[in-house]
Image (cartoon, rainbow, N blue to C red):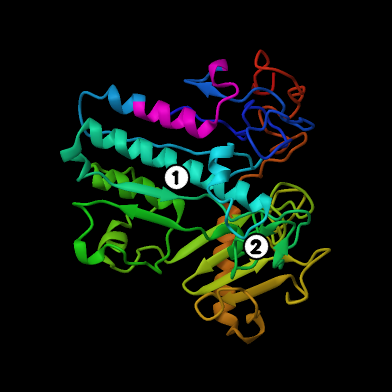
Amino acid sequence: MVGTSQTSGCFPHRCCEAGSPDADDNFTCAGRYAGYDWFEDGVPAPAANRTKSSDVLAASASAFLAARTTTPYFLEVAFQNIHGPYTTTPAFRARYAAKNVSDAERTLFGYITEMDAAVGAIVDAAKSFDAARFDDAVVVFTSDNGAPAFGKDSVDHTRDGDYIARNHPFRGVKSFLWEGGTRVAAFVSSRNRVPAARRGARSAGLFHVTDWHPTLVRLATGSAPAGLDGFDVWDAVALGAPSPRTEVLYGLSPLCDAGQAKAPKAALRVGELKLLAFCYAVAGVDGAAASGPSAGPGMPADFSPDGLAVYNLTADPSETTNVVAALDPPLLANLLGRLAHFADASVPPMQWDPPYQGDDYACAACPKHAPSAGVAEPWLPWL
């Protein structure tokens, strides 16, 4: 894995807000995390200052490949694009000058194209390293969450500010457990490992990010450790077989009014049914005697009085019709039982403020890292 920025890809590599659409030299910092945030091998790397993270990642990945003397290899590249702040260089914005889109969208599209160019450079480097073996390589490209809202925390928006609602037709945005915040696109490419008849095919199977670990270990002829949350999904991806995954836990937090994740606070998919709880108590956390769902302030009108919603994602991927009242009681009880099973095995979620992850957290009383400025003051843990 190559060195990567933690949260910010602004050209100064500090947590910042974009002060301009191009090159972002005019940045501002007014937040929790203001230290310099580019590291290599755990050590601050000031040479990356005033450079695009995509360029640094492409160069680092290419150098890794150039230094290889043996195969196989594993390379993970965690791009900052297209996390905010949205900035790119004039050359990439210019590619969309003639398009009938807003200036903000030109920046966004240029920002995406910037990443595409970096991916191309890395693939070219991999081919140069060993063109014959590259035909056996497996390239996986995936995102981590849906697009965020702009200007408001809308979960049903059609357009926010200058940005088209990029999660359409799915409900919700980043930080929400709706499909718009959690369902993302991915693709897999391999000349020799994906049959020709399967190339270009789409899969409607159920997959989760934890599935990549055992899948890639299998492709490397290894044996994945027992007890993993993930499944080997290669036959589902490459051959079109049914996915071995039948359920997905989206998230579960007992912090109804706190934490980064917004309510609904718990969601579980089993088959084609998705259960959401607006709030969810976890036994032993914040004095709760038992685990279970509840209502809360700001709950959507389509939720039941006890804070539940169930959507059939096959018939209703946009999550518009709550069918909880029509479910057979044993089926609903099974869904709630599975959610309680995960709740009982969970740990308190991280919060922005003390005690962070509960009173027994190792750093519950640690002071926050004070906001800093400049390359000489990196973003460091706690003390």
Q: Which mark is residue 254?
A: none
Q: Is residue 224 above or below residue 173?
A: above
Q: Residue 332 lies in what quarter of the image?
A: bottom right
Magenta stretch mostly in which secondary structure? Answer: helix
How many C-alpha atoms fall within 10 Å of the one at disc 1: few (<14), some, or many (≥20)? few
Q: Is residue 61 magenta?
A: yes
Q: Which mark is residue 116?
A: 1
Q: Residue at the top extreme?
A: 376
Where's residue 108, x and y in %?
60, 49
The quadrant of the picture occupied by the C terminus is top right
Question: Residue under circle 2?
Answer: 165
What residue is shown at x 74% (from left), y 35% (from top)? 19
How many C-alpha atoms fall within 10 Å of the one at disc 2: few (<14), some, or many (≥20)? many
Kindly report the distance in space between the C-alpha atoms of the residues bearing marks 2 and 1.
Answer: 21 Å
Q: Is residue 221 visible?
A: no
Type of amino acid at the residue the image marks with label 2? Ala
Q: Is residue 297 above or below residue 258?
A: below
Q: Which residues are magenta?
A: 46-62
Where's residue 252, x and y in %?
63, 55
Is 349 on the left or on the right of 288, as rendered? left
Q: Residue 76 lies in what quarter of the image?
A: top left
What residue is shown at x 69% (from left), y 34% (from top)? 360
Disc 2 or disc 1, which is closer to the eye? 1
Is 165 on the left or on the right of 117, as rendered? right
Q: Is residue 191 magenta?
A: no
Is 356 on the left or on the right of 38, as rendered? right
Where's residue 267, x and y in %?
61, 63
Q: Is residue 256 visible?
A: yes
Is 63 on the left or on the right of 334, as rendered? left
